[in-house]
Image (cartoon, rainbow, N blue to C red):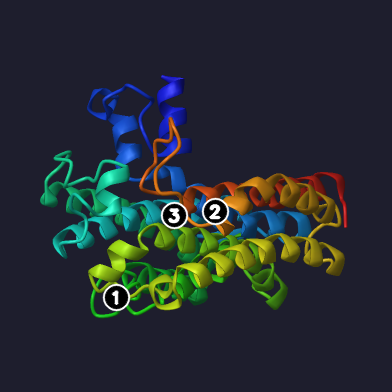
Amino acid sequence: MLKTYAAVLLRQSPPEGVDWRSMSRLARGLLLARASVLPLSIVGAGQGLLVAWWRGTIADATFGGAPVSGALLGLAALVGASLAHTANNLANDWRDYHDGLDRPGYPRADYSPHPIASGAMSSRTLLIAIGILTALAALLGGFAMVVRGEALLGAFAIAGLILSWGYTDPPLRLKRRGLGELSAFVVWGPLMGGGTYLAATGSLDAMALVATLPWACIVTAVLFGKHLDKIEADGSRGVRTLVVRLGERTSRSVTVVLISLGYLGVAAFAALGIFPIIAAPLAGLGALSALPALRIVAAPRPAAPPAGYTLWPLWHVGAAFLAGRPAMGALFVSLALGAILGLR
């Protein structure tokens, strides 16, 4: 069982030799919802709560005369953002399937089971699942907004919803217009991190928003990697992502730059006092451990997958994710240690 969940959550695939249909319902659900990418949201939203903890700005609220923990409100925002991300993954699958993209021969339908194309569920059932997840996310976000009495929290949530759903859905269709990467930068940076910080503290300042930018660079790089893997399929179907517009070689360079900026940003912000000073050496160590994956990001895609590689036709997105993973550790560990030990 542990092997199954590790494969699903770390590699977006069932264990070798295992038919995904034979897995437990929970494991199948996590696989279909692409839960392997949820750490992007856990860090994106979680960093706001961690920054508030380190800065000592978490503040309780009162509702109906009773105290409500600021940490609980921040946690509600974090879980809500993660559920919204899951709903958005499924919504993108629904839209792209009905737009004729997610079919055999297109990367999304080939590297992992697609909820509809694989026969796992009907279009109607998928819509119901999307509705339930979206409702749960709205309840958690609404809880934080009502208790805090902060309309800005609602504005952040609505902006995130518009950008996330507008990624594939009309009338915005941001992905097709070359704006999907920019929307990811905004959603997984200032909106998630800033929203969670606001929920936990009841206030928001420029430094809390600036602190989200290094992770926003990492998430955008992962999306660049995903679109690099689909550049030929997207280009031939008229999906004009920014990667299609820039071209393969330039996009690889941009992806490397974004990942590098993520690490440099963590180190620089530590020097400026936006993060604990311990974040600087941790970012340096993380960058060194990310170098092998970064070299893969920088190089052209091979003609065929190496033996035992399970995510083909995906290639650059996996390398970009691995290159950014040490940045997760640098952010989480430095902020947690900074808060526990009182490091500045």
Relative vertical location of residue 270 with respect to residue 152 in this rendering, above or below: above
Q: Read off the residue under disc 1.
A: 173
* C-alpha distance separating marks 3 and 1: 24 Å
Tell me the kind of residue under disc 3.
Gly
Q: Is residue 23 visible?
A: yes
Q: Are marks 2 and 3 in contact (CB under 8 Å)?
A: no
The alpha-carbon separation of the residues under discs 2 and 3 comes to 25 Å
Of residues 254 and 299, the one drawn nearer to the viewer in this rendering: 299
The mark closer to the camera, 2 or 3, is 2
Q: Position of residue 6 (x, y in %)?
A: 47, 29
Q: Does 134 sit left or right of 43 as displayed?
A: left
Q: Quadrant of residue 172?
A: bottom left
- Taking the spot 18% from the left edge, 49% from the top edge, the residue there is 104
| Residue type, mark 1 in image | Arg
Residue most extreme to the top: 1
Q: Quadrant of residue 35?
A: top left
Give neighbour class at mark 3: few <14, some 14-19, many 20+ (Cα, 10 Å): many
Foreground pick, 49 / 148? 49
Residue lying at 75% horizontally and 48% vertically, measured from the top left: 288
